[in-house]
Image (cartoon, rainbow, N blue to C red):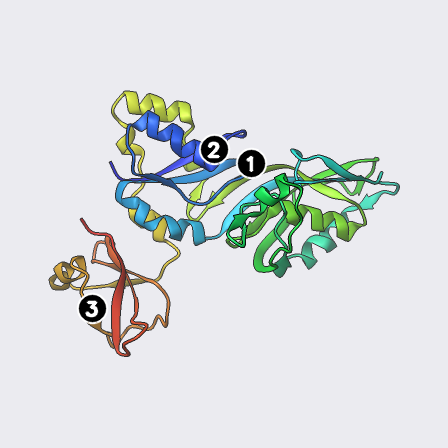
Amino acid sequence: MEGILPLYKPKGLTSHDCVSKLRRILKIRKIGHTGTLDPETDGVLPICIGRATKVAQYITDAGKAYEGEVTLGISTTTEDASGDIVAVKPVERPITKEEILGVLSKLTGEISQTPPMYSAVKVNGKKLYEYARQGIEVERPTRTVMIYSLDLLDDREIFSGEKIAFRFRAECSKGTYIRTLAVTIGEMLGYPAHMSDLTRIKAASFTLSDCLTFEQIKEKAEAGVISEELKPLEAALTCLPKYQIHDKLIEKVKNGAVFPTPADWKFGNAHVAVIDKNGKVYAIYEAHPKKSGLIKPVKVLAD
């Protein structure tokens, strides 16, 4: 059994919990997730099985899309609804749709973020949430992320009340903290805020419509048809450029050969999926980092 199983992750489970549960259901050990999804976030979590674990990083590195909710007036320790309240400021004035759209526009593109203390980012070899649970505040690294689009999913012209909530959709790069984005939206509107709901609707090429629940997976596994639901390795590599090789070179690629750089190789330092005429991926190559004029395999994916 090998391939990519798009899982619908329910709220209340960590990504590691999901892997452990699938190992029991599928009775297979070689399983890995494709990047952590917070316990209180549901949605798309592609799971790599067997040989597909070799390409997990390319799903992790690909863009993601989310639908979430910002609540103004309250901020929390975790920046989401699961944390303790740290600030309350009733919303004393109506907020217009135009104001919100203006803030979302300013946050679209390349932005800087400081990861929340309750996150898995490591500082000095220790995860930030481990410091946070001990009540220790440490300096956190600021990172640059890309927000490809940020849209308001609410048709109201005026938002009013002591607490205001509205939904949004974000398409973003790897490493983006949507919780932190929600807090920033609130700050730019003049209020403490937190992310009160979040669903990942897309990871790499996988969407909610591709996903199976644990119950569906268990039923199909018991019926012996779960293999039919696995997506091929190629589905994880849609973000990579492709280079087609002749059939006579396939065996050499499968054996991890180093080649002279082809004349039509125009990929710079990018990772490139090497495919046959039918689109099957045999390996991922890159320009040799030490020997000019050569390309070398990063990963060999063929049996």
- Residue 194 placement: quadrant: top right
Classify mark 2: helix, strand or loop: strand
- Residue 33 placement: quadrant: top left
Earlier residue among tags 2 and 1:
2
- Label 1 near label 2: C-beta < 8 Å? yes
295 relative to 89, above or below: below
- Residue 143 placement: quadrant: bottom right
Mark number displayed over residue 72 = none
Q: Residue 154 at x, y = what percent? A: 69, 40
Q: Tag 1: residue type?
A: Thr
41 relative to 270, above or below: above
* Residue located farthest toward the right when viewing the structure as drawn: 92
Q: CA distance from mark 3 to mark 2?
A: 40 Å
Image-based side of 187 in relation to 108, left or right: right
- Label 2 near label 3: C-beta < 8 Å? no
Earlier residue among tags 3 and 2:
2
Q: Nearer the viewer, residue 131 or 216?
A: 131
Mark number displayed over residue 41 = 1
Q: Nearer the viewer, residue 166 or 37?
A: 37
Mark number displayed over residue 258 = 3
| Residue at screen point 39% across, 31% down | 20
Mark number displayed over residue 9 = 2
Mark 3 or 2: the one toward you: 3
Q: CA distance from mark 1 to mark 3?
A: 43 Å
Image-based side of 204 in relation to 231, left or right: right
Question: How crowded is the residue under tag 3: few (<14 C-alpha within 10 Å), some, or many (20+)?
Answer: some
Classify mark 3: helix, strand or loop: loop
